[in-house]
Image (spheres, grey):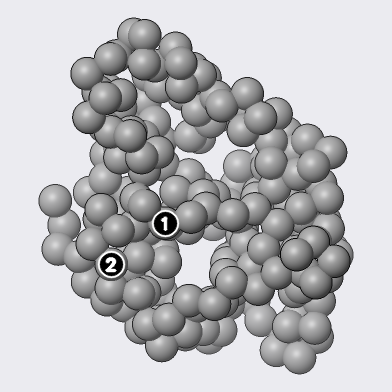
Amino acid sequence: MPAIIRANPPKIWFLRHGQTVWNAEHRVQGQMESDLTELGQSQAAAQAAIIAPILETHRPPVLVSPLRRAQQTAEIALGGMPITTDPRLAEAQAGVFQGQTLSEIAARYPQIRAENPHALDLFCAAPEGEGFEAFYARIANLLSALETPTVLVGHGLWGQVLRGIICGLTRAEMAALPNEQGCVYELENGTERVLRDAQTR
């Protein structure tokens, strides 16, 4: 396991994609594709209301996961602002679990499911998956490359590790983090602030 370190990159605004069809079905996506639901589109619209003044004031660069749900979210939330697609922002590759529901995983891999109640640990324990060490290293690599305050649009587990690295959390603490959609996580100087649209509170 990699050493958990606290990183202090430039200020980050992190957007998790909105709800997808597979989210609603409790089906593991990983690096497979699933489109936003109507609720997911509404969540991205809520992010648009939050991020608009930030974009206008700071004009930050935007990096987005190549996976379609993140691209769809960015299109709605950022109003057509220019983006750069970065493969390092893709969600954890969850091996044989991808495409299966959580109940199917529990039936087929009862020991793995029982030992890993949190999604981050479950994805990273998947046979033929990416694993935590490689996932963590990929995220840390992107963080080390940031030179200016940046908007990142990606995925739930990716965001948990990102937030954990910046806030100096252990792996167990990362895995237990809440994982909201429709908000913006503002990360700076080792702290996290969750920005929410006033109309959705």
- Residue plotted at (84% across, 38% down): 38
> In the figure, 127 relative to 149: above or below?
above
- Cβ–Cβ below 8 Å for labels 2 and 1? yes
The residue at the far top in this view is 108
Left of 124 or right of it: where is 61?
right
Indicate the position of residue 95 as horizontal and vertical percent values. 36, 25
Query: Which residue is labeled 1 in the image?
Result: 177
Occupied quadrant, residue 14: bottom right
Amino acid at pointer 1: Leu
The residue at the far front in this view is 201
Indicate the position of residue 159 as horizontal and vertical percent values. 47, 58
- Residue plotted at (62% across, 33% down): 23
Q: Badge 1: few (under 14), some or many (20 or more) residues near its Cα, within 10 Å?
A: some
Left of 31 or right of it: where is 76?
right
Secondary structure beneath dot 1 equals loop
Question: Which of the pair 75/166 is nearer the observer?
Answer: 166
Count of numbered badges drawn on the protein: 2
Query: Which residue is labeled 2 in the image?
Result: 169
Q: Badge 2: few (under 14), some or many (20 or more) residues near its Cα, within 10 Å?
A: some
